[in-house]
Amino acid sequence: ELKSIKLLAGNGGHAVTRARIEEMFDTVISSPEDVAKMQADERAQIRAIASLFIPVDAALIDLLPNLEIISSFGVGYDHIDAQHAAKKNVVVTHTPSVLDDEVADTTVGLLLNTVRELYHAEQYLRENRWESEGNYPLSSLSMRNRTIGIFGLGRIGRTIAKRLSGFDVAIHYHSRNPVDGVDFTYYSSLEEMAEAVDTLISVVPGTAATHHAINANILKLLGSRGVLVNVGRGPVVDEEALIAALKDGTIAAAGLDVFEEEPKVPQALREMKNVSLLPHVASASQDTRNAMGALVIDNLEAWFKTGQAKTPTPETAHIKSSKA
Ligand code: NDP
């Protein structure tokens, strides 16, 4: 029965998941731009989108009158207009929880790499400079006596905090609502937290409310020992202000897995020594990506078999089909 359902998928994305989807559904491969050029009756047959990173805006949703579900790969869904989908009674699903451990591991690695310059130390050895020039210079920063502020103590933020609890560092957090059952110090304002900490880990979603939340003022409050780690979304940080703050010593260093205009990373950042840069790989192990892909497929299957998705986004969690 699933094989008779027309599903739209973009080019690229996680190969294992794509292959499985193509096997299970009557898959139409198209870019969002090409969908606009399709005949209206062809568009009307499409009931699902598998978004393995293809953006789904309001215009694309409006082109598909019988769309029921957008199953997205990844927990962050800033590339999908979920509010518009909700208005059109289209459920949007994502892949929460299955990637928490991987992203938290990567975050801790990125933090240590940034603070202790491990990447540069390894480069030094690989260039054989240890033998020819002697010991690598002492790192000016250390994890000792750091106060960590986690911006977004959600599923991933809590998993990061659990790991950092073993590091003997103070842990504070900011989100709009305090979290029950944790004894980390809560701040209702990001400014107040930035003033109290020297190490800021950002793991909030990319939304209108978080856009450029980390600006010149927040960076200044972190102080000259300040370290910023961003694993949430690029646009949460004002990249231009960050570059200026890193250049003039307003903060000491930054570790970044996400950027404002991926995959473009400003040359100024790529040339700086006091940064550690990763190409958006926080969840990118084969095991974790397979688990995310399995959840993309489970959501599609559950929707068409039971009328209820497994992990809908909060905006569309109320939507069920007549089958439910
Ligand atoms: P959750 O929804 O579980 O947590 C989000 C947290 O952010 C909550 O604590 C929420 O608390 C807080 N938050 C949201 N909006 C605001 C705001 N305007 N001001 C202050 N706090 C806010 O999400 P996850 O932990 O599962 O994922 C978080 C994000 O991490 C994803 O949306 C994604 O963008 C990013 N991510 C990046 C990856 C990578 O590869 N680099 C991999 C996976 C995720 P409250 O609602 O109380 O404010």
Image (tube, rainbow, N blue to C red):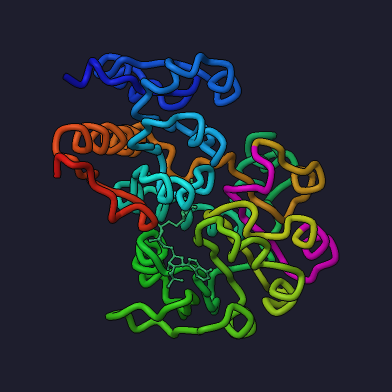
Question: Which residue is found at the position 66% from the left and 47% from the top?
Answer: 120
Left/right of residue 237 with respect to residue 233 in the rendered view: right
Compare residues 297 and 154 and report the one nearer the observer.
Answer: 297
Q: Dividing the image into 4 quarters, which one contains the C terminus?
A: top left
Start-end of magenta stretch: 243-262
Asked whether residue 14 appears in the rendered view, the answer is yes
Counting from the top left corner in percent of width and height, residue 185 is at 44, 85
Counting from the top left corner in percent of width and height, residue 61 is at 48, 36
The furthest residue to the front: 41
Compare residues 215 and 89 and report the one nearer the observer.
Answer: 89
**Is 312 rendered above or below residue 13?**
below
Question: Which residue is found at the position 65% from the left and 39% from the top?
Answer: 262
Left/right of residue 145 with respect to residue 215 in the rendered view: left
**Is 12 rendered above or below residue 150?**
above
Asked whether residue 93 appears in the rendered view, the answer is no
Question: Which residue is found at the position 54% from the left and 36% from the top?
Answer: 55
Question: Which residue is found at the position 27% from the left and 20% from the top?
Answer: 5
